[in-house]
Amino acid sequence: ERLYYILSNTEGKNLAFDENGKNALAIGMSDANGLFRFLLKDLSTSFYYPFFDGETGRLYFSANFKDSYGGTDLYYVDTNNGQVLSQPINLGPRINTPGNEIAPYVFDNSLYFSSDVFYGMGGMDIYRSNMQSNAGYTIPVNLGKGINTEYDEFGMIIKQNEDGFLGYFSSNRPAGKGSDDLYGFKIDEKPGLPTLVFTGKVVEPQYEQSIENVSVQVLDADGELLKEVFTDTDGAYQLEIPYTDIVTLLISKEGYSTFNETYNPKGLEALEKTALKIPLYSIADMVKEEEGKTVLDVKDFYFDTGSSDLTPAITAELDKVVDAAKNFPELQLAIETYTDSRGDSNANRRLSQQRSETIEAYLVGHGVPSENITSSKGFGEDKILNNCTDGVYCLDFLHKQNQRTLFVVGNYGELSQ
């Protein structure tokens, strides 16, 4: 057990002063045996409001260093067994302002603190910011009436018990006994407006490269836009909205696939605990030029002789077409199926048509909108690619070059812009 507290700078039993005659405040620590140690000490800089977070080993405090955003800012240092292991780290512009921030307190993955600059009710108000896995903080939320007034509120602490939450804070509101008085409260839920926080990164899956300037939208249950942000140069995004039970995350950029996922309360709870890694596929990486056409880049597959039945090898490739259509909802496809020259030409045309229709039925049955398939035609042996025409002897692998199915992308130009 350790006690962290504020005291004047001393040298031995005497006060210590800087060259300007200033005696600043330091942070000291005493352990269970009464052993004292200065942790943070500077003759010209005062340290205030220490709070030690036992889970992370961080010691939070307020100070006014040269790198502050103005006034008193919030900082932390990493510690181990009472030893300071790092330089003071500023909590950044999401928390600190040109005004004064004081009295940090961490509870249930939230940072509570007071500020006199944020959209407050007057004087010092108490705020809550959710702490994120990427060491960031969400937009601070004012705890509102009941706790905050037009006067000063600070020094918030809160604990959970069987009946809800119990907390205490200081305030100089007129109802007190003097200047700064202690007040307590008991509530059923954590104070402050509940919010949803979305964080993640958008990458190209093939090369794991970040994609910048990607639109990240959050829609409500009716499809109305709640908020939109764009990824930065590292492909990262972060946004926060007031809590709602059902939301859809829509992530898109021209020339890339679309991520579209709807979350219910259970899914939202899991989503807030981790940063998403969203893959977006470039349409340029999913197509190739073949026979003068832009087609989906899938492996060649073959039907059994005289059959239009799908095999596992065929459906494995068709599933890639299904995925492409899901990733690119506006994708327009024309299915073209061809046979080799062996057999009757009319029978080959009918067989290839049956194969095209079987492929279309599979795609539609697995979620590809029928309006996305502009045509499904069987051309039989009309377009032989080599010399293996009627009556010409060819090895089987040469005949197979003519047995092919093409998925022609009709609107590639629009998708790639």
Image (spheres, grey):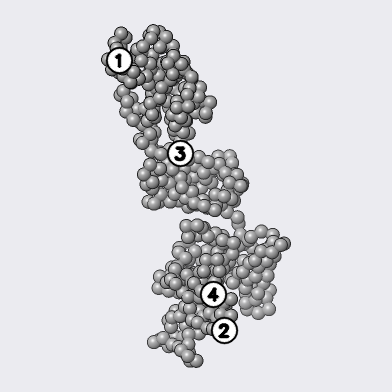
Q: Is residue 381 left or right of residue 201?
A: left
Q: Nearer the viewer, residue 130 or 28?
A: 28
Identify which amino acid the numbered label 1 is placed on.
Cys
Q: Which residue is mark 4?
A: 49
Q: Which residue is mark 1?
A: 394
Image vertical order of residue 162 relative to residue 353, above or below: below
At 72% from the left and 62% from the top, the residue drawn is 163
Judged by depth in the image, the label closer to the viewer, 4 or 2, is: 2
Number of marks present in the image shown: 4
Identify which amino acid the numbered label 3 is placed on.
Thr
Where does the image place residue 70, in percent across and percent down from the top left?
44, 70
Q: Nearer the viewer, residue 222 or 174?
A: 222
At 48% from the left and 72% from the top, the residue drawn is 79
Looking at the image, the residue that sits furthest to the right is 163
Q: CA distance from mark 2 to mark 3?
A: 61 Å
Query: Badges 1 and 2: C-beta atoms under 8 Å apart?
Result: no
Q: Is residue 136 left or right of residue 171?
A: left
Which of disc 1 and disc 3 is earlier in sequence? 3
Local secondary structure at mark 4: strand
At 33% from the left and 15% from the top, the residue drawn is 383
Residue 34, label in figure: 2
Identify which amino acid the numbered label 2 is placed on.
Gly
Q: Quadrant of residue 355?
A: top left
Which of disc 1 and disc 4 is earlier in sequence? 4
Q: Which residue is mark 3?
A: 258
Q: CA distance from mark 4 to mark 2?
A: 21 Å
Quarter placement of the C terminus: top left
Quarter placement of the N terminus: bottom right
**Callout 4 crowding tier (Cα within 10 Å): few <14, some 14–19, many ≥20:** some
